[in-house]
Amino acid sequence: MCADVVKEKTRKEKTGLNKPAGKGGPNKGGPNKTGPNKGGQNKGGQNKAGQNKAGQNAPLAAGPEKEAPQKTVERRFDDPERVREFVETKKHRSLVGLAWDTMGALQLKLLQDNGLLPEHKVLDIGCGCLRAGVKIIPYLEPDHYYGIDARQPLLNVGFKRELTRIGMETRMNRENLYTSSVAEHVRLPENSIDYGLCIQVMTHYPLNFLRIMLENSAKYFKPGAKLYVSFFELAEGEPYAKPYLNKAGTRSRGHKPPLHYLRRDMEYMAQGTVWTPSYIGYWGEPDGQYLMVYQKN
């Protein structure tokens, strides 16, 4: 064997090129140890910690597929499905606000302090399930209370359940309760109402509702009759767009309920009508709503 051949054989033995792939071959110390299959991408790269483990190509886990989070949809207070659910589960009172007994008694006192007598007739606009009615009806002569609300199921449950609960179901005809959103298409006698209430209603409706309600209901009221309307008052100089925290700790808003209004806006809505507005202010309402009174000319 010539010297060149011996040298080449010795070099291969030292480098391991003649040994089979295994413990001492290139697979031990070569690129396959630190390459993509063992220490490269497959161990710490894309295939282990990337898409195949947490990405879109990863296999689905066993068990039921998780549903995507549903977006919460804020439902209006007069949403028919919501109203029906609350009536069926006997939670109808919560649809007309908190403090059932307190608010009913407060409205009766408001009217009595301003001259209400049993022979007078009262129109309750936005009466709901008769929160004020269960306090006012026993005080008035029979069939002297009238109510209007856009949610007929609340009128039904108010008459059938709430009046029955206090033993007053025979003191008022069911025909005295009307389904309407803006006091129109009701069968009230004209020039018959002495006092009106529209309490905790304007917090749900845009300002134009007040104007329409004043126009539509005017024919039912006697000259000199008074209509009391509550609202969240926005302080003069405060921006409409920002939430406003009133003295009672209630936060009102300018773009969605609970809505707030300036006093001068509540007064302006009566311009050109048969009503003369006056500001009363805070009247003890638990949520911090203020009061306007509109007197028919």
Image (tube, helix red, strand yellow):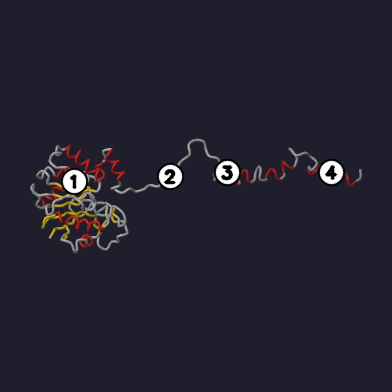
Q: Give the camera-side residue of 193 and 6.
A: 193
Judged by depth in the image, the label closer to the viewer, 1 or 2, is 1
Q: CA distance from mark 2 to mark 3?
A: 24 Å
Which amino acid, mark 4?
A: Thr
Above or below residue 93? Residue 272 is below
Judged by depth in the image, the label closer to the viewer, 4 or 3, is 3
Query: To which quarter of the image does residue 291 belong?
Result: bottom left
The quadrant of the picture occupied by the C terminus is bottom left
Q: Label 3 belongs to which residue?
A: 52
Q: Label 2 belongs to which residue?
A: 69
Judged by depth in the image, the label closer to the viewer, 3 or 1, is 1
- The residue carrying pointer 3 sits among few (fewer than 14), some (14 to 19) or many (20 or more) residues within 10 Å by Cα, namely few
Is disc 2 placed on a helix, strand or loop? loop
Which amino acid, mark 1?
A: Leu
Q: Residue at x 29, y 42 (%)?
A: 84
Whether residues under marks 2 and 4 lie with C-beta atoms below 8 angstroms apart, the answer is: no
N-terminal label among 2 and 3: 3
- The residue carrying pointer 2 sits among few (fewer than 14), some (14 to 19) or many (20 or more) residues within 10 Å by Cα, namely few
